[in-house]
Amino acid sequence: MENYIQRLPKVELHLHIEGTLEPEMMFAIAQRNGIALKYRSAEEVRQAYQFTNLQSFLDIYYEGAQVLIHEQDFYDLAWAYFQKGKTQNLRHAEIFFDPQTHTERGVSFDTVIHGLHRAQQDALSQLDISSKLIVCFLRHLSAESAMQTLKQALPYKDWIIAVGLDSSEVGHPPAKFKEVFDEARRHGFLTVAHAGEEGPPEYIWEALQLLQVQRIDHGVRCIEDEALVKKLAQDKIALTVCPLSNVKLRVFNTIHDHNIKKLLDKEIAVTINSDDPAYFGGYIEENYLALREGLGLQKQDFYQMTSNAIQASFLSQEEKKRLMHELDVVQ
Ligand code: ADE
Ligand code: ZN
């Protein structure tokens, strides 16, 4: 089974590039940028990763991102993710980045996206991993700030497939960003949003109806609303579920309590993703393995969820067909 999981052609649809910053790289980049960290070693940083909820993680995650200043820093960050992905048979990734985390401290949008884009090009040519970028708005900041971020993204429309919504969920419903998402769609961006991670099913309804999203990020709390479950299944709205993240941030007490199999059995298009792998103890393959260990999922479950990810990606029909063929030959 481990061997089967290893060989599956993986597609990751929920990955924050700032969440791939491993403590060793945090130290190396801090040193070359002359930034003092409040930790003495990578080990000490890891020990600080004890989270009680989403906010307790976000506080540390935004702090870590402060070391990223130059284009090369963003390149190195993304390149390391792709290299790791190569060892796990990652074939395609749709990657979130949080421009406001950087522009708020004087690092330009252009610096961030140029570094990421260059790493994407190298990943495609040297590692045969394709990828797309999704600009995320931080929902704890204002709608005006999100609109300003959208304006900064417009010159890079060809490098960005979609806009998304992340950060502190409760108290910041999707409705707050309706106008920004309307404007983004007018410019041709696809849309996704984090909803139903800590927030209630109503936020998932809002993301669908007001933001007109193609996918829901997390979405695990949909299970509390039968009509919503039915709609997600009927309309084939994929959920980008992140098992290890959900346990680390106490959405579920343990991996054994995770509801992903229940959602799968309700015919919702669930997918397996890593969210912020450097913080949650595993990349995409470790998330697959955790579900094997914790829920005893079978080959057919992993086949289905991998197929769901291919189909829910923003790849062309032709590219999806090619990946489906890769999937179908794995025995
Ligand atoms: N930013 C990075 N990871 C996140 C998550 N799991 N939820 C909301 N915002 C995030
Ligand atoms: Zn996320």
Image (tube, rainbow, N blue to C red):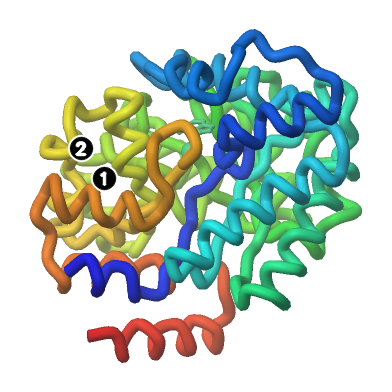
Q: Disc 2 designates what residue? A: 225
- In this rendering, the answer to whether 259 lies above or below 288 is above
Mark 2 and mark 1: Cα distance apart in space: 5 Å
Q: Quadrant of the C terminus?
A: bottom left
Q: Residues within 10 Å of mark 1 (few under 14, many from 20)?
A: some
- Residue 82 sits in quarter: bottom right
CB of residue at label 2: within 8 Å of ligand 1? no
Residue 312 visible to an observer of this rendering = no
Secondary structure, mark 2, is loop
The front one of 1 and 149 is 1
- In this rendering, the answer to whether 203 lies above or below 2 is above
Would you say 123 lies left or right of 298 here? Answer: right
Q: Residues within 10 Å of mark 2 (few under 14, many from 20)?
A: few
Q: Three-letter amino acid code at disc 2?
A: Asp
Q: Position of residue 137 (x, y in %)?
A: 66, 34
Q: Which residue does the image show at 68% across and 45% down from the upper left?
A: 77
Q: Which residue does the image show at 89% across and 24% down from the upper left?
A: 106
Q: Which residue does the image show at 17% across and 31% down from the upper left?
A: 254
Q: Disc 1 designates what residue? A: 228
Q: Three-letter amino acid code at disc 1?
A: Leu
**Tag of residue 182:** none
Is mark 2 in CB contact (under 8 Å) with mark 1?
Answer: yes
Q: Quadrant of the N terminus?
A: bottom left
The front one of 118 and 242 is 118
